[in-house]
Image (cartoon, rainbow, N blue to C red):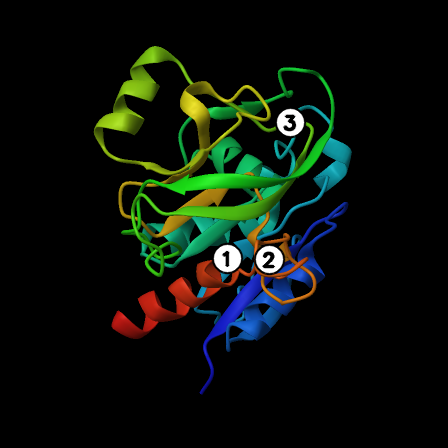
Amino acid sequence: MATRIGVVTFPGSLDDRDAQRAVRAAGAEPVALWHGSHDLDGVDAVILPGGFSYGDYLRAGAIAALAPIMSEIKQAAAKGMPVLGICNGFQMLVEAHLLPGGLIRNAHQQFIRRDQKLTVTNSDTAWTNRFKTGEEIVIPLKNADGGFTADAETLKRINGENLVTFRYAGVNPNGSIDDIAGLTNEHGNVVGLMPHPEHAVEPGFGPSTPDAMRSGIDGLRFFESALNALQVA
């Protein structure tokens, strides 16, 4: 039986279908989940996709973090289920206190879209085990509220416990503290990041590389990592 990975759709989600396509490209079965449901439909992992849930009212991800399905996701995450939050999904994870810190408006106060270099800083998680620590990858980035922030005590804990999964390389596009682009929880099953790996899974549709235009597929390994983690478990 194929591994089943749920992708939650919220009002304002934009990249849920892209995340489903990425799951399928990795060899798993995507399962559409609804924000208003209390049923995870027996999935093995969950993805919170990018977009502008509830129009980013209050704060980005703040209302979505209170959606009915999030209570089920919190319980599942506590039991070790792999959970990935991409962009708006990362914002949901910090608003739901599944990851530390917060996301605020970009330092230059503008929406940004670019192919972004990242340095892998923790390859020992459910969503990064197909990478090597220290490796540089390129993933598309698009956000307006992508500046990671945390107080001094939280930042000390994040770095002390090796919770940073990715740092921006070459340029910090949104003013994130310590160049932080992605985080994991202490158990390594919950990961959030601002860049969009689901937009770098198919040749012809990803970032350009020295080999060919639009040929980058570094994002595919995120979803392959989850399959690998579930098989090992």
Percent from the top left, x then y, of residue 104? 59, 21
Separation (CA) of disc 3 from disc 1: 23 Å
What secondary structure is marked by label 2? loop
Percent from the top left, x then y, of residue 68? 59, 49
Q: Mark 2 points at which residue?
A: 200
Q: Name the residue under label 3.
A: 145
What secondary structure is marked by label 1? loop
Quadrant for the C terminus in the image: bottom left
Q: Judge whether 209 appears above or below 194 on screen.
A: below
Q: Which amino acid does label 1 sit on?
A: Asp
Q: Name the residue under label 1.
A: 218
Q: Judge whether 3 appears above or below 116 on screen.
A: below
Q: Compare marks 3 and 1 and give the one earlier in the sequence.
A: 3
What is the residue that sits farthest to the top in this orientation? 152
Residue at the (70%, 62%) spot, across then down: 17
Q: Can residue 21 be seen in this view?
A: yes
Is 139 on the left-hand or right-hand side of 83?
Answer: right
Q: Specify the quadrant of the image occupied by residue 145.
A: top right
Q: What residue type is labelled 3?
A: Asp
What is the residue that sits farthest to the left in this orientation? 160
Q: What residue type is labelled 2?
A: Ala
Separation (CA) of disc 3 from disc 2: 21 Å
Q: Compare marks 3 and 2 and give the one earlier in the sequence.
A: 3
Q: Which of 47 and 11 is in front in this view?
A: 47
Is 226 on the left-hand or right-hand side of 95?
Answer: left
* Category of crowding for the residue at label 1, using alpha-carbon neighbours closer than 10 angstroms: few (below 14), some (14–19), many (at least 20): many
Which numbered disc covers residue 112?
Answer: none
Separation (CA) of disc 2 from disc 1: 6 Å
Percent from the top left, x then y, of residue 140? 62, 46
Percent from the top left, x then y, of residue 152? 34, 12
